[in-house]
Amino acid sequence: MWYLHTPSTTRYREAREARMGLFTDLRDSISRAVDRMFSDAEPKRIGIYGPPNAGKTTLANRIARDWTGDAVGPESHIPHETRRARRKENVEIERNGKSVSIDIVDTPGVTTKVDYKEFLEHDMEKDDAVRRSREATEGVAEAMHWLREDVDGVIYVLDSSEDPFTQVNTMLIGIIESQDLPVLIFANKTDLEDSNVQRIANAFPQHETVPLSALEGNNMDEVYGKIAEYFG
Amino acid sequence: MPEATPGDSRNGVQIDLISGARMEGLTSMEKIRLILDGVREGNIVVLEEGLAPEEESKLIEVTMTEISPDEFNGIEIETYPQSGGSSQGILGRIMGKESTKKLTVIGPANQIETLHKDENLISALVSRK
């Protein structure tokens, strides 16, 4: 039988091909999503979050150095030293004969306000302080974007010598919970005299709190055990 | 109480109490604009029912993009802490049992300072521009 290629049959064929293409795209997209859900090969991206100066980069560097030999970024006591999210890929952590591969994302400290005058107190010229504050605001916005779009789990780092009942902590933990991301709370700086791990555990009783000193390397065995357990 | 005109706010601090009903029909960005436009004018914004976590995340992000040296340093925001966190978990959220409604106070970071906060009380000091 012969078919005449009239404009209507051509339109029909084009429509059918478009439907087939749509179906193929949909099938591929579902297949990719299923692969992501069940693939063990893909390292999970673990975001290190928390307020400024909690020791996030010190922790990221400690983990990276222990398992890859490299650092992630510079550490400083001046707030907002980390103003760009930095990713260290394929960090292989071995625990109990099991190997867990993660990507560590060290993020800028989250806050709702940035005042350049704060940096002037750290012997900075005004131009440098303004530039640093601008970069810091961009970094916080970037960190929030990563949290909504690009991480599979969260390590929330707090300075255990500081009051954990702050609005930023409450909001961020709420945001993480609303995304249904697995989260571990790290009570950092246990080497400080004012450290109070129990205060953090009381503030967020719905999550596991792990004490550590990333600077001194204290309790890192438990830290790696929990990372493997939660994110492996 | 005598009604003030907008110009009177130069002599004091304007407080906008926004009901849940007023926010209900707005999109996330409309809510964020409503809040930030008020705060950038130096007003204290009180939300009867607060924001959803996703909206709080976007509020932080948009606030950061608007910070400008010597003009706007960002926001101070306070809500009552939710005791026990989201212990209802995912099932509670699927069943629609979890409520995100919480009174929220938002103001310019250079004008509002939280003095005390617990599960039942938020005490803040508000200064003029």
Image (cartoon, rainbow, N blue to C red):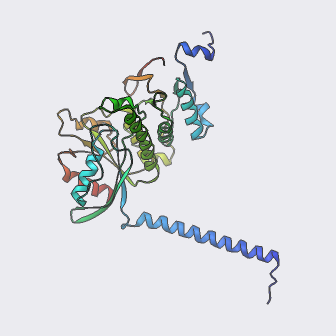
Count of numbered marks? 0
The residue most toward the bottom is A1
- Vertical comparison of A3 with A29: above or below: below
- Quarter occupied by residue A207: top left
For the point 46% across and 45% down, the residue is: B92
Q: State the image coordinates of residue B26 (x, y, percent, origin top left).
A: 61, 37
Task: Name above or below for residue A96 compared with residue A118.
Answer: below
**Residue drawn at x 51%, y 39% as measured from the top left:** B62
**Image-based side of A6 in relation to A123, left or right:** right
Q: Would residue B90 be seen by someone viewing this image from the given angle?
A: no
Q: Position of residue A111 (x, y in %)?
A: 40, 36
Query: Where A149 falls versus B80 (above or below)?
Result: below
Q: Which residue lies furthest to the top in this view?
A: B2
Nearest the eye: B95 or B33: B33
Tell me if I can see residue A198 in this picture: yes
Across and down, in percent, residue B73 comes to 45, 30
Quarter of the image for residue A2 reads bottom right
